Amino acid sequence: MLRALAVAGGVAGAAVLSQFPEFSQQYLQRLAGQVDAMALLVAEFDATAAANGLTRDAALAELRGTPFLIDRRTDLERAFARHDRLAANLAALRAASPLERMAMPHRLADPETLRATWADFRPAVPVTADGGISALVGYFAGWLGASAVLGLLAAPFRRRRTA
């Protein structure tokens, strides 16, 4: 009975993890679109600043005096920081194989992109080597996890051997 449950845990792990390569690919595509769109904002701001003889930091510093300008400066600073963070994540994810991405969950952590990717994601049968390897890793992770949990739950009910 416990072995059957452990195998079921393995199958569940395989099913879930086999989807990771495709999910990470779709996340990567959405991330690239966001980085491209944000790069336009950054380039336009920098061009406007340069046309007025200012650096980005100097142009941001000029956004003061009214609550609206201060809020706009804060919005732009947040957008510039997000662009830098997402661009770095995109570069790292592009350089990694689908299997290497499994070890990079921190690079797949933008809440907006993750939510949008998940909303449109549809599981598929993994027909690539990466999908198969992910399924195998998922099977063993699920099997080991289920075995460990079941072993801990069953421990109080085992008979102790007496000498």
Image (cartoon, grey):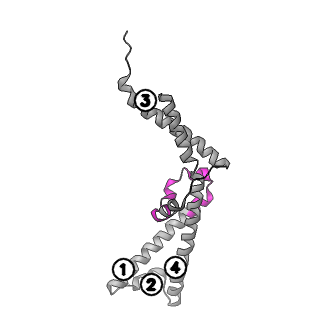
| Labelled disc at residue 151 | 3
Q: Earlier in the sequence, mark 2 or mark 3?
A: 2
Residue drawn at x 53%, y 90% is: 51
Mark 1 / mark 3, whichever is N-terminal: 1
Q: Is residue 52 magenta?
A: no
- Cβ–Cβ under 8 Å for marks 2 and 3: no
Residue position for label 1: 71
Report the residue at 35% width, 82% height from top.
70
Labels 3 and 4: the sequence-earlier one: 4
- Counting from the top left corner in percent of width and height, residue 126 is at 63, 49
Q: Which residue is mark 4?
A: 41
Is residue 85 placed above or below 24 in the rendered structure? below
Q: In the rendered structure, are the residues bearing label 4 and label 2 in contact, judged by CB atoms less than 8 Å apart?
A: no
Task: Determine the CA span between mark 4 and mark 1.
Answer: 17 Å
Q: Quadrant of residue 34?
A: bottom right
Residue 93 counted in the magenta span: yes
Residue 161 occupies quadrant: top left
* Up-down relation of residue 156 to residue 108 (above or below): above
Among the two numbered marks 4 and 1 on one chain, the one whose residue lies closer to the N terminus: 4
